[in-house]
Image (cartoon, helix red, strand yellow):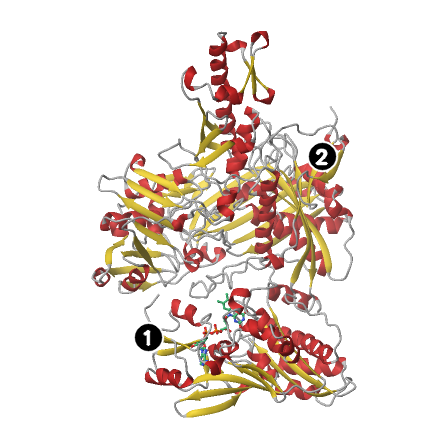
């Protein structure tokens, strides 16, 4: 068999895209599909562009009350007492609740699909019990005839606090003298399975080791060790959190909300309110972005409790400052990483110490951080220690490839320094060290076929890499990144209509165009047009358990369910044709062009047989239910060109290309959209995004004015190169797309900035004041 | 949001009467782009909001031989939308083009920007550079103050209870004059000034020497800052790198910024100098009628 190095590749425009949308093609190997790889208009497009689509806050019900949540002004305090009596007396107020109105919870773990949760801690995060642990921590809630009355009444709730010193930095928080946030937290050491015996902020310690690390460093010609810091950043979805709930007198709870996972909301509401899951129906509304932040509950159980107390449906909306203050950003971090290479630039060893902010309660993505830190390279000897550390900030939650962006900043910066020191081209270094099928990661996982090498090859062949960057204060950097992706549970049901179309129902909420990409997979199998499938996302009473739209799993796993449903339809239609022709169903084939063929040249089209279903045994419903476990991991490599104003430290992105192995692009436009969107968020994280805290632990920039996500003026047209190394675990080869593209940008930007200025930035964000400070220092 | 009463008087006298009848609890409303937000966040808690947009005196926008009259409630878009005004008083037009986006500019006024008296207000340095005077009406009659004397602290100004700003008046522009305002922001648009600089220069007929100059800074002191020394460094000097560097040094020297999340002391002082140089060069180019390099968002 030819080795990967002998294969012939080219980069060319991806059909149907703009000039910046390209793909890597291997000579003699082009995928051959009818629907997959085309760009039909999304089924939900018209509603979205005409404003008709109904998002969470659009729900209106008769008798609806509006709620308001009272939040902590302190970063760390003990709640001495809460007196709600004055609020309850305000005319127009129908209910007031605190944590005391929820059932008490125990220490048990729940799996939300993109992270674990302890029910006891989630209960306290939803409404504080005896302590508040961050500014904005919910303390009480009011339901009233209008949100203004609710707000005025909430101000009459008297909360007596005993203010405690806050701790905001991971290194301080793990120190012996640090104030301890949760007196029930003990260090959980994995994989050893040991538990500490004293209260601490260090909730978890992960340790991974492979090979002989000391020997590996001893064999190195060059060893570089560096420290890095990143700040807390938020997903910045446009739609704030919202929940409306009605607790019916018969004990049934209905929740209307925008979420990444309606079944996860159902589970959390049921657990926290101590009712059976069958008593809870979650109706997912359209969602204005989530990126990992709309999985955990915040408002939903509170709205339900207020509804129980008032007997009326209750709506709770967050405003933007609530979203920043009190939802789940991704952690700030401190990282120390060391890499050794031999004289030929082959990595001999790697070592990492990673400290991630958990926020108020345990649960940072430290474990994925550990698993990703050396994931792109063949590291023969490695040691990784990762710590999940509680600090007085909101409880962190998933954000696109949780943990991987942090660690890529460290590893990819050091790789760039190695290239600089050894005079190796960064592309060549990566081609030489890239992981391939069969390589073992430091945490012990062995790779299936993966496309890291191919993404670098695409960089090498790209117009961007081959175009020289000229002019003063300009530089080009590249960086790579990895994400696991995920499979999990998905269910699809598909009904064949008499007119030859299919109605598809699914439980996956659609954030990035998955109605289209799931429908297209069913259409490909059946041989019909994507437009002849009508996908609908339904509530939790109407379809089987479906995991979150997260972990880049939906196109892969719900797509698999759609494929299974299509195959089920094919099998049933073969029986119907057999019945019509009076033959055995084994004698009927479902062939190309959506045509069934039988003995003696008998044929009938999908369209025709669809009209005959009621005469042949009733409507046909196909079903697909999967627990997918063969999601292939995926890699991306980005190229950034920047110009740095030497007098102000401001960084301008001149050109940017995202190269990513997606397995197979079902709907290339949405794949490119994910690649561009992830890069945009990563560039924002690189340059300006950060939570600013005062020494008292108060968040100072809970608004989009001072929390600076990039605007359209700050980004060039982001170019894309889709690489398609099919995932053997999916019939079309889908790997998942959404998360990888946020991983490389901060490192790619830092490497580009170094080449523009000679200054290495090892602390995010690389904002103008920090950049200028380094520039002035480097001038002497 | 808290309840409040709303009045929209049609005359200046009625407005003054309403404001002086409730001196502690009444607030004028022009575009409302600051006021409504401040009520929402409870920074201000007025019981009465007096909409001043219907008063003719506050909607004057007149360019004459002796200068420009700008009514306090005139929204930004009318200012940069008038080509003659935008050319003669280009610093104010520069400010109006970057205050918020299109929606904000169709409501927000220069008067509101001034009366809100934020240290980072984008139009106030332009008013100071262009030697504007602020016309105030109140129960005690009319008075005028220089733009640089109007603000007294963050969110504070010389207005006494019951007073409001009627208009801002600018002297006529010199034959060879140019002005410019720009700000430093971390992004390229939709942001708040980390440092802002407004400058107006008058050149001699040849365009080779400064006759006079006025320079003002935003966001580097508790109030918008008039830097007389920067203008003095230019007056009578040939247009040269040295003279401009001296003015920039004076600006850097005058800046007394604080460390906050938007910028450090080191950063703001440095940028005060850098922007002052860039702004003077642009104002000179405009005075000379040269093609200039300035684009919004750079
Ligand atoms: C999205 C957004 C973006 C913004 N961007 C910028 C920006 O880039 N740069 C910038 O400088 N500002 C910006 N602002 C702030 C604001 O828009 C400006 O300060 C604007 O000029 C205020 O004018 P207004 O007419 O809306 O004032 P208002 O909100 O009506 O009033 C502001 C204050 O002045 C008082 N007041 C108004 N008129 C009078 C009067 N005639 N006499 C006495 N007191 C009076 C009011 O009582 C109030 O206290 C932004 C605001 C928003 C919401």
Q: Residue at x 60, y 22 (%)?
A: A593
Residue A410 x/y as whole percent: 61, 50
Q: Kindly identify which numbered label has been placed on residue A25.
A: 2
Q: Kindly identify which numbered label has been placed on residue B47.
A: 1
Question: How many numbered dots are placed on residues in this image?
Answer: 2
**Does A415 appear above or below A133?**
above
The quadrant holding residue B164 is bottom left
Circle 1 packing at 10 Å, graded few (<14), some (14-19), many (20+), is some
Q: Which element is circle 1 on?
A: loop
Circle 2 packing at 10 Å, graded few (<14), some (14-19), many (20+), is many
Q: Are marks 2 and 1 on the same chain?
A: no
Q: Kindly identify which numbered label has been placed on residue A615.
A: none
**Does B16 appear above or below A11?**
below
- For the C terminus of chain A, give its image quadrant: bottom right
Pick whichever, B113 or A337, lies toward us: B113
Residue B134 vs residue A295: left or right?
A: right
Pick whichever, A160 or A21, lies toward us: A21
**Does A456 appear above or below A775?**
above
Q: Residue at x 50, y 9 (%)?
A: A581
The chain holding disc 2 is A
Residue A272 x/y as whole percent: 31, 43
């Amino acid at each position: 068999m030819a080795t990967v190095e002998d294969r012939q590749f080219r980069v060319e425009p991806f059909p149907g895209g703009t000039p910046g949308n390209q793909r890597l093609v291997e000579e003699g190997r082009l995928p051959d599909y009818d629907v997959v790889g085309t760009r039909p208009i999304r089924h939900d497009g018209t509603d979205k562009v005409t404003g008709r689509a109904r998002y969470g806050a659009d729900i209106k019900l008769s008798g609806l009350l509006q709620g308001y949540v009272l939040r902590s002004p302190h970063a760390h305090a003990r709640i001495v007492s809460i007196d709600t009596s004055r609020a309850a007396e305000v005319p127009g107020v129908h209910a007031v609740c605190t944590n005391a109105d929820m059932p008490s919870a125990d220490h048990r773990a729940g799996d939300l699909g993109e992270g674990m949760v302890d029910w006891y801690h989630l209960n306290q995060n939803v409404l504080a019990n005896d302590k508040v642990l961050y500014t904005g921590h919910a303390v009480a809630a009011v339901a009233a005839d209008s949100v203004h009355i609710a707000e005025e009444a909430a101000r009459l709730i008297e909360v007596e606090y005993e203010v405690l010193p806050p701790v905001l930095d991971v290194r301080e928080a793990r120190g012996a003298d640090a104030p301890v946030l949760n007196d029930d937290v003990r260090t959980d050491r994995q994989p050893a399975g040991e538990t500490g015996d004293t209260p601490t902020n260090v909730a978890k310690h992960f340790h991974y080791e492979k090979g002989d690390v000391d020997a590996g460093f001893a064999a190195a010609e060059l060893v570089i060790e560096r420290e890095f810091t990143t700040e807390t950043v938020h997903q910045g979805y446009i739609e704030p959190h919202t929940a409306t709930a009605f607790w019916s007198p018969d004990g049934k709870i209905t929740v209307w909300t925008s979420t990444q996972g309606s079944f996860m909301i159902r589970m959390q509401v049921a657990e926290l309110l101590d009712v059976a899951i069958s008593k809870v129906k979650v109706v997912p509304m359209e969602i204005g972005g989530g990126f990992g932040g709309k999985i955990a509950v915040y408002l939903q159980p509170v709205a339900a409790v207020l509804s129980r107390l008032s007997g009326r449906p209750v709506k709770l909306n967050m405003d933007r400052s609530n979203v920043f203050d009190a939802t789940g950003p991704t952690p700030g971090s401190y990282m120390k990483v060391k890499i050794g290479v031999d004289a030929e630039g082959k990595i001999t060893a790697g070592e990492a110490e990673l400290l991630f902010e958990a926020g108020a309660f345990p649960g940072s993505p430290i474990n994925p951080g550990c698993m990703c830190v050396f994931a792109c390279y063949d590291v023969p000897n490695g040691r990784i220690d990762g710590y999940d550390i509680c600090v007085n900030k909101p409880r962190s939650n998933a954000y696109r490839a949780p943990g991987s962006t942090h660690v890529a900043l460290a590893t990819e910066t050091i790789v760039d320094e190695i290239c600089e020191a050894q005079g190796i081209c960064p592309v060549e270094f990566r081609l030489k060290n890239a992981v391939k099928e069969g390589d073992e990661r430091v945490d012990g996982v062995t790779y299936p076929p993966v496309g890291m090498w191919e993404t670098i090859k695409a960089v090498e062949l790209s117009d961007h890499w081959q175009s020289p960057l000229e002019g003063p204060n300009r530089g080009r950097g590249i960086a790579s990144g990895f994400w696991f992706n995920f499979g999990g549970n998905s269910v699809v049901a598909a009904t064949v209509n008499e007119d030859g179309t299919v109605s598809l129902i699914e439980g996956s909420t659609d954030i990035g165009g998955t109605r289209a990409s799931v429908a297209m997979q069913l259409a490909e199998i059946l041989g019909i047009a994507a437009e002849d499938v009508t996908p609908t996302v339904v509530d939790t009473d109407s379809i089987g358990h479906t995991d979150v739209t997260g972990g880049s799993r939906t196109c892969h796993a719900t797509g698999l369910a759609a494929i299974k449903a299509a195959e089920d339809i094919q099998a049933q239609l073969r029986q119907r044709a057999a019945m019509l022709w009076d033959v055995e169903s084994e004698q009927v084939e479902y062939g190309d062009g959506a045509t069934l063929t039988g003995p003696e040249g008998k044929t009938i089209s999908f369209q025709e047989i669809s009209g005959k279903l009621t005469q042949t045994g009733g409507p046909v419903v196909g079903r697909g239910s999967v627990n997918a476990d063969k999601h292939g991991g995926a890699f991306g490599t980005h190229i950034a060109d920047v110009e740095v104003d030497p007098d102000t430290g401001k960084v301008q992105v001149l050109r940017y290309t995202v190269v990513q192995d997606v397995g197979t692009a079902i709907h290339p436009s949405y794949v490119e959209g994910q690649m561009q969107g992830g890069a945009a968020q990563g560039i924002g994280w690189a340059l300006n995004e950060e939570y600013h805290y005062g020494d008292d632990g108060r968040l100072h920039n809970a608004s989009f004015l001072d929390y600076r996500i990039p605007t359209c003026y700050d980004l060039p047209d982001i170019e894309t190169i889709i690489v398609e190394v099919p995932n053997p675990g999916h019939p079309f080869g889908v790997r998942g797309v959404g998360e990888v593209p946020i991983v490389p940008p901060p490192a790619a930007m830092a490497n580009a900035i170094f080449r523009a200025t000679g200054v290495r930035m090892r602390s995010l964000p690389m904002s103008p004041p920090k950049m200028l400070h380094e520039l002035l220092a480097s001038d002497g | 949001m808290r309840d409040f009463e709303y009045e929209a008087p049609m005359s200046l006298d009625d407005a003054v009467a309403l404001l002086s009848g409730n001196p502690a609890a009444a607030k004028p409303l022009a575009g409302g782009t600051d006021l409504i937000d401040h009520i929402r966040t409870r920074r201000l808690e007025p019981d009465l909001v007096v909409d001043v947009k219907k008063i003719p005196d506050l909607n004057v926008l007149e360019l004459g031989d002796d200068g420009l009259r700008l009514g306090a409630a005139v929204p930004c878009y009318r200012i940069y939308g008038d080509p003659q005004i935008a050319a003669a008083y280009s610093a104010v037009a520069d400010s109006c083009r970057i205050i918020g986006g299109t929606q904000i500019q169709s409501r927000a006024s220069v008067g509101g920007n001034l009366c809100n008296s934020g240290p980072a207000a984008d139009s106030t340095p332009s008013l100071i550079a262009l030697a504007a005077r602020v016309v105030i009406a109140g129960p005690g009659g009319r008075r005028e103050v220089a733009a640089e004397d109007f603000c007294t602290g963050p969110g504070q100004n010389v207005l006494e209870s019951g007073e409001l700003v009627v208009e801002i008046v600018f002297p006529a522009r010199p034959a060879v004059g140019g002005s410019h305002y720009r700000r430093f922001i971390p992004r390229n648009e939709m942001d708040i000034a980390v440092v802002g600089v407004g400058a107006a220069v008058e050149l001699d007929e040849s365009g080779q020497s400064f006759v006079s100059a006025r320079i003002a800074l935003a966001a580097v002191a508790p109030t918008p800052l008039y830097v007389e020394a920067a203008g003095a460094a230019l007056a009578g000097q040939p247009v040269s790198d040295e003279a401009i560097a001296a003015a920039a040094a004076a600006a850097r020297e005058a800046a007394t910024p604080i460390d906050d999340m938007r910028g450090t002391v080191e950063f703001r002082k440095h940028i005060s100098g850098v922007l002052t140089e860039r702004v003077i060069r642009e104002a000179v180019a405009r005075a000379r009628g040269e093609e200039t390099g300035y684009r919004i968002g750079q």
